[in-house]
Amino acid sequence: MRNGVWLQRSQILVAKQIEIILLSPAKGEIQEKRKVKNEKRKKLKMIHSPKYSEIYSRATKYCAAQERCVKQVSNKLFEWKVGSDDADQIIDQLQKENYINEERFVKEYAISKFHINKWGRIKIANELRRFMLSEENIWLGTQEINSEEYMDTLTKLLATKSRGIKEKNKYLAQRKVANFAISKGFEAGLVWETIRDMKK
C-alpha cells in the first residue's frame, strides 16, 4: 500500500516537472531575447549620443556634396576612425534617409565619366565594380548613356586620334587608333565597325 502511494506521488511529481519544462522557455531562447534587447538598447543609446550625432552630421554633408555609394562612405568613416558597429548603423541610417542611393550613384557616375573622361561602357562598368556594386545596378548605370551620343563621341575620338597618328602603314595606323578607343572602354567590335564606316 505504501509502495503504491509512493509510486503515485512520484508519478505526479515527474508529471509536474515535465509540465514545467514544457511550459518554460528554453534557456537559449531567453538568452537570445536578452541579447536582442541589449543590442536594441545599445543602438538607441548610440544614436542619441553626441559623438554619434556629430559623425552622422559629417557623413550627411559628405553625401550631400555629391552622390556616394556604401563603399565610399564606409572608407570615409574608417578614415574618421569610426568603429565598425557605429559605421554600420550610420550607413543604415543614411540609406533609410536616402542620402545613399546606389542606383542614383551609378547613373550619375556613368554619365559623368562618359561626358568628362570620354570613357566607354566597358571601362565605366569595370570602374563601378571596384565599388562592390551589384551587376544589375552597374548595367542600369551604363544604360543611362544615350546611344546616339555614345556613337558620336566614339567617332570624334577616332577622328581626332587618326589625325595625330604618323604611321604610314594604313593597317598599323588603324590598329593604333582602334587600340586607343578600346583602351578608353569602347567595345572592340563597335570600334572596328566605326573605323570601317569612316573609311567609306
Image (spheres, rainbow, N blue to C red):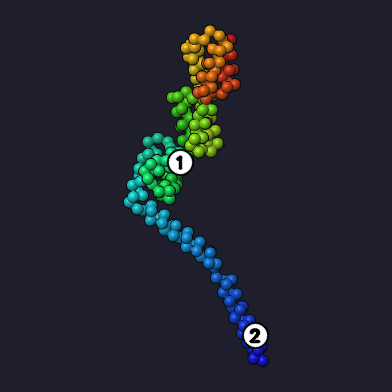
Query: Residue 92: percent from the left, percent from the top?
Result: 45, 47
Tell me where residue 191 sits by quadrant. Answer: top right
Q: Compare residues 192 and 148 and report the one nearer the observer.
A: 192
> On the rendered structure, is 157 left or right of 16?
left
Q: Residue at x 59, y 17 (%)?
A: 193
Q: Residue at x 63, y 81 (%)?
A: 11
Asked whether the viewer can see residue 81, the reply is yes
> As drawn, which residue projects farthest toward the bottom?
1
Query: Residue 86: percent from the left, percent from the top?
Result: 41, 49
Identify the residue position indicated by label 1 in the image. Answer: 70
Give the SS element for disc 1. helix
Looking at the rendered image, the quarter that the C terminus falls into is: top right
Give the SS element for disc 2. helix
Between label 2 and label 1, give the one nearer the viewer.
2
> As drawn, which residue projects farthest toward the top?
168
Identify the residue position indicated by label 2 in the image. Answer: 7
Q: Are the residues flagged by discs 2 and 1 in contact, CB closer than 8 Å?
A: no
